Each structure stands twice: as structure tokens, then as C-alpha cells.
Amino acid sequence: MSVIVNQSRRGFLKTSALAGGGLIVGFILPGAARFAAAATQSFSLNAYLRIGSDDSVTVLCGLSEMGQGVHTAIPMLIAEELDADWSRVRVLQADTDPAFRNPLFGMQVTGGSTAIRGHWEPMRKAGATARAMLVSAAAETWKVDPATCRTEKGAVVHASGKRLSYGKLAEKAGKQPVPQTVTLKDPGKFRILGTSAKRLDTKVKVTGKAQFGLDVRLPGMLTAVIAHSPVIGGKVASFNADKAKGVPGVRQVLSIPSGVAVLADGYWSASQGREALEIKWDEGANATLSSASIRADFAAAADKPGLVARKDGDLATARPAKRIEATYEAPYLAHSCMEPMNCTAWFKGDELEIWASTQAPGLNQIVLSQVAGVPPEKIKVNTQYLGGGFGRRFAQDFAVDATILSKTAGVPVKLVYSREDDTRAMFYRPAALCKFSGGLDDAGRPVLFSARTVTASISQAAHLPIKDGIDGFAVEGISQMPYSIANVAVEWVQQETPVGVWFWRSVGHSQNIYFVESFIDELAVLAGRDPYEFRRTHLDKAPRYKQVLELAAEKASWGKPLPAGHFHGIAVGESFGSYTAEVAEVSVASDGKVRVHRVVCAVDCGMTVNPDIIRRQMESAIMYGLTAALHGKISIKDGRIEQGNFDQYPILRMNEAPKVEVHIVASREAPGGVGEPGLPPLAPALVNAIFAATGKRLRKLPIDPGELQRS
């Protein structure tokens, strides 16, 4: 997806002088004209950039910082075109405001690896516009032609050697005409972009000054927990409010649509009050639901024709010399953010204010307007630092319930999920099953590829439009299968269950690239070819896939001797505009325990902002993906989610973590995402290595050591 937006559609720039001297540049997106008008009169947080008379440069970032580095990357975009002194750059979390809408979503949200893709040009133009106005101010001061001036590291310099810092020019610059067009730097002249500039959020985090949602404290605030039905879709039949109120510190017990809430002076009192409620549940129609029954329904659905997402050639006339069929499965997965869900809400009668670690402050305003019964502009969302997001914090459940509780209780309320509440909250990566058929000609070339995937619709769960009846999330990573195969068919069978589904890191790619790249490995074995060479040969029409595949194989020393008992597996995929290949080096013990020693990752994410951030995101995604491949599984029995805390839903431990090497392709292509693309190739690279080690093909995640035991 292109991030270039026509200037006439994007809007316009407004500036104003700061009280006390300074320059504000606000890049106003469509629909934010009223905020632009306000910016010409007084200080307004719709501005992306402030230059103070003290030479400070403050960037206001409307995106949510959840560890991915956006509070550094966005300032780098502006600072590059501004020719700022990076040591003088600071960042602040912006208010929720239409001026900060994500161009790729149309509202103020953070996710889908869109931060840089969506802001690459707008933020650079904001910096370039400010730079042009500073030059104009300096030229006016010196009474010289602006063409005789240049900028460097926070100052305007004249050809004669005269120099003025941005701070000294800021107030006058704020009064200059706004240029209608600006010229952006050629990437070859970047000084900040492409470097590993230090992160701007590190200090506040290591010193404990960063405020996360759980850190919020307000006068008169009560802390709430909610008792939810243990059975999916169950309802409250009765409860004993008096027993809960007998717990010291408990102030109120409220029945709300999602369950029974206990409000107390603190979290411990609230949780103890919840334990005392003596709730009886009406378990409803899902009391017999199980993972086994869901799996059986998926398997039956896979035998039925689906909606066609891709069709090349004619499978009916293909006559492969060799044929193979396989069915792959992936389970429901929880997000397991480090910081469990929480939200503090304060309903004040005619307005609402919330404090939340949220990926979607703009969506909060829309949804909570309906809940609180006040206009969206009367809802103030204070976006806190996020202790992990992974798509989970797009959801509105915790903000909605916090708002209901504050409105009902008449006081500020902080709603807190326990780890068990969070794990069982019914916002899961969908379970999926994919049935493949493939074939080779006499020369071992693939001539047939058929995939029918069965899964629920995330778009339907999120109330998003579905184009032509096919949820793109359900087939992404399959329908874009890049190999040169004449006859291709990809179908989707929608299979809904009572289990709630949601966006999970890399969304459909997370299971679908595992499916495809594992099956491609099977075709390579059927052809009697090396898995790397087989892929490379048939990526002749996909050069960016081929380049990262070759780089990963080279850096991993593919085909060369490994330590005794070690084996390689490889996989490649594209997601969010970036191309990633990974090689996993694996050993399998006699008891079936899998050890991943090393993962080599090659990524082409287009033009880069900060290589260190890219490496960290790739490493993070690989560890997250390895957690899922080795351990991740949400299962259902008697209508209940079986997992609660990390004893039942383990995450990767330090002693399981492999060495990870990340190699970044130098590219002039448009920027791609980096928060998610490192995850999808991990699982197939892992299971392909396990096949190389054991000869056993694992078609179901997570990996079961019992299937790999040797007598």
C-alpha cells in the first residue's frame, strides 16, 4: 500500500507563535479544519512539532508507544527533514484529536505495522515545512536571499558564515507564510534516518517515570474487578452482594452486562470481594462446547467448497505426475500482554475522561460516546504507555466496562483484569484448519497448489466490512502465495464458533504462512530437492522474496556442516509490506524436546528509520512466534477456557531463547512494517527443521514432544 497521499486531499499546514516565543507546526489531516483554526490563535496540541526559544524540539506523537519504538521513529522522521540536533529532540504523547489520525486507518489508532508506512511522508513534510519557515525567518533577519542559507543540526547558516539557532528564530518563523510545497530530502542525504539513534523513551522507563495504565491514581478512585461467566456465553443467575460487601474495603457491588463487578478501595479488597460473591451461573447453550467438537466441525467444513479467494489456471485439467495432500491446524491463542488489560474512567455528567493503555484512542471516543451518552468531543482519552499490545488493545471491552462502572458508581473507577481474566477474555487469534493438495510434473516442478482454509472471521468480530464476502484476514499469506505454479486455487470456508476471535500479532499471516511454507517444504521433499533451492527456483517472479531467502540462507551457512544433531529449516513470507526469511537451527532430544539454538532472519522492510528498532522488533516477533509454536494453545472443555495463568499458558523462558541474528536489506522501496513481519516465518522454519532432524512432519501446533519421542 502506498503511503503517498495527494497534497490536496491531505489538508494543509497551520502555524502560530507560542506564548513566550516559538514555532508550532501542525500537520492537519482531512476533517480537522476546526483544530487548524484553533492553532492559529493559541497553543494547541494538534501540532506535531514545537520549537522552543530554548532550542528544544518537541514532537507530539499521536501514536501509542507499546515498546515498538514509535516515540523514537516518528520524531526521527520530523527531525531528519528539520535538520534538527537529535540531542535536543524530545517527545510527548499527544491528546486524542482528529489531527493525529493514522492515514491508513482514518482514525487515531496504532497497529497493523502502519506507524511508519502511514506517516513516512506526512511527518517528513511537517519537518521540511518548519525548516523552510526557519530559513525564511533567518533570511528576513539578515535581509538576504533564502537561497543563500542552509540548515544544519538545529541552526540556519548563511553563506557568509553567520549562524542563528532554531530557538532564536522560532518566534519569527511562526509568523512566516506557510509554503505551499516543500522538497523532501533524497534518501542518500539522510543524516538521522537510517541510523540507530538512541530511543527517546528509554530514560523514563528505566527510571520508573513512565506512566502505564496500571499506574493511574485519582482522588476518590475505586478499583474494580468483574466476575465473568466461567462458561462461554453464560449469564448470572444469582449472587450474594452482602457477602462481598462484608469484605473490608469493598464499597459497591454492581451487576453489569458482562458480569458482576466489585468496587473497593484497592485491588486486593476487590478481588477478595469477588471471591465472596457466591455466584450461581446459568451456563446456557455452550456448556458442552469443547476443542474436540470445534475441531470436528472444522474438519467437516474443510470437505465443503469455500469462497474463492484466488484462482489461477485450471486445477481440473492439471495432470501432476506426483501428488500430495496434507491438512494443517493452528489453535486459538491469547495475547498475554505483560500488562493485563485495565482502564480508569471518570464520568463527570456531561463529559468522560479515561486513562488507558490503548492502541485505539480514536475508536475509544466513538465507542464510549455511545456508552456514556455524551458527544465524542466530550470524551478525553489519556493514552498511557502500553505494556504490550499485539492487537489486544484495539479491543474496547475494558474501556467500555470501566465507563459503565464509573457512570453507575458516580466516582472514578479503575477496572483491572487479573492474568486469568485477561487469558479468558475471549479475544483470541482464531483457530484455523487448512487442507492442501499439491502436485509436481515429471521434472519435479510444482504444477498444482490448492488450499482451503477454515476459520472464523476477525472482520465480522470487529464489525469491519468484508469485501466480496471474503475476509482478507482469513486468507492473507495464502492467497499471496508467491511461487510460480500454473494452477492455484485458494478458498475460505467461514466457520464461526461461540469462541471470540480478534487481531493477534501478524493476524492471519501468523497461521497461514506456517501452513503454506510447511506445505511448500513437503512439495520440495516430494520433488527430492533441497528445500532452499526448491523455493529459490520457483521465486523467479518474486524478487524481494528471493532476495531475503538468499540472504538468510547465506548468513545461516545453509548447506554447510552443522554441529552434531543440529538441523536447519527455512521459510519466507511477506506481510505488512515487508519481506522476511528465517532459518532455524534445531536439535531434538530423544524425549522429543525441541531446542532452537539459532534463528537467522533477513528482512527487507524498504527504507529504514532506525536499524536498532528493526532488529529489536524482529527479535521480539521471533520470540513471540516461538512461544506460540512451542507452547501456545487455548483449549476449551465443558464450555470453559482451560488456561488461566502462565502455569497453564506458558511463555518462552530465557533458557529456551535462541541466538537471533537479524540482517536488514538495504532498500529504496517504500517503508514496510516491522512490528509483525518477523513472526510468520518462525513456525514453519522450526517445523521444517524438525522434519530434517526426525523425518516427522508436524502439521499441528503447538509442537507436541510426544510425537517426536524416540525409543
Image: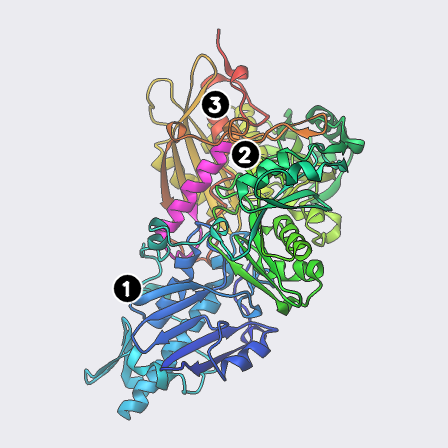
Q: Measured from the top left, where is residue 10 in percent x and y? A: 56, 73
The amino acid sitting under disc 2 is Glu
Which structural element holds mark 1?
Answer: helix
- Quadrant location of residue 201? bottom left
| Range of magenta residues | 603-627
Residue at (53, 80) in percent of width and height: 38
Per the image, label 3 sits on a secondary structure element best described as: helix
Quick one: 451 or 143, which is closer to the camera?
Answer: 143
User: Which residue in the rendered view is the most extreme toward the bottom?
Assistant: 143
How far apart are labels 2 and 3 at the CA level? 14 Å
**Magenta portion: prevailing SS class:** helix
Q: Is residue 93 above or below residue 322?
A: below
Viewer-side residue, 415 vs 442: 415
Between the C-alphas of marks 1 and 3, the distance is 48 Å
Q: Is residue 223 left or right of residue 175?
A: right
Q: Quadrant of residue 429?
A: top right
Distance from Cα at disc 2 to Cα at disc 1: 45 Å
- The residue labelled by disc 1 is 87
| Residue position marked by numbered label 3 in the rendering | 690
Q: Which residue is mark 2?
A: 517
